[in-house]
Amino acid sequence: MKHIAVYPGSFDPATLGHLGILKRATKLFDEVHVLVVHNPSKQPLFTSAERLNMIKQSVRELGVDISPLRFSTLESGLLAEYAEVHGAHALIKGFRTVADIEYELPMSQVNNDLSGVETIFMASEPGLGYVSSSLVKEVAALGGDISKYVTDAVSQKIQEKLNAS
Ligand code: PNS
């Protein structure tokens, strides 16, 4: 049986923390779907297509094996349904702190109720535990150096976005 997982998130933009989790997930599953999901409670800086493109570019830049990866977006509908339709038995969620687990736990339980999908929580790499997409955007907007937190591809796109605004 092929073991398939979905790695969902807003990824606005994906940080090196996200990409580290993604790389590690490919060691555990035969196929990993990177899914850029519309989260109505957030105001994204980038469109879903831009976010997905940045992840593809970042994966290439970091030399991550692309063969187990699939890339998609979910603009509406349930994540649990996407997992079911695509034969995925697991969702991958990265966590940095206990606060992340508190946010994720009810979602994992509801997703399990909805379709039986399991959520696998993966701890962030020790050096990246404080990095978030929102902090990266804030530091960049205030002229700070974000090169330790994101790939060159993401850094460049953030600059382009900031210059255009
Ligand atoms: O990166 P984020 O914003 O923390 O990701 C949260 C996300 C988008 C994965 C979550 O909001 C989600 O799963 N949305 C899909 C809609 C859905 O299935 N909602 C019910 C979840 S219990």
Image: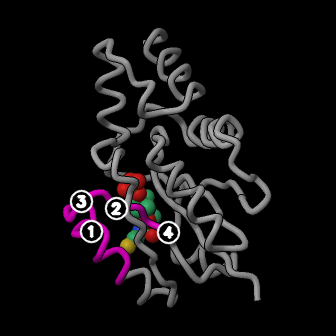
* Contact (Cβ within 8 Å) of mark 2 with mark 1: yes
Q: Is residue 136 left or right of residue 9?
A: left
Quarter of the image for the C terminus: give it: top left
Which residue in the structure is indicated by mark 1?
A: 101
Query: Where does label 3 land, which residue?
Result: 97
For image coordinates 72% across by 59% down, the residue present is 70
Q: Which residue is mark 4?
A: 92
- First in residue order: circle 1 vs circle 4: 4
Residue type highlighted by circle 2: Phe
Q: Residue furthest top?
A: 163
Q: Nearer the viewer, mark 3 or mark 4?
A: 3
Which type of secondary structure does the marked residue at label 2 adopt? strand
3 and 1 marks in contact (CB < 8 Å): yes
Tally of numbered tags: 4
* Residue 59 within the magenta-colored segment of the rendering: no
Q: Is residue 17 left or right of residue 97?
A: right
Q: Are marks 3 and 2 in contact (CB under 8 Å)?
A: yes
Identified by mark 1, the residue type is Ile
Tell me the SS state at disc 1. helix
Q: CA–CA distance between discs 1 and 4? A: 13 Å
Q: What is the three-letter code of the residue carrying label 4? A: Ile
Which label number is shown at residue 95?
Answer: 2
**Which residue is nearer to you in this view: 62 or 5?**
62
Q: Residue at x 46, y 9 (%)?
A: 163
Q: Which residues are magenta?
A: 92-109
- Amino acid carrying label 3: it is Thr
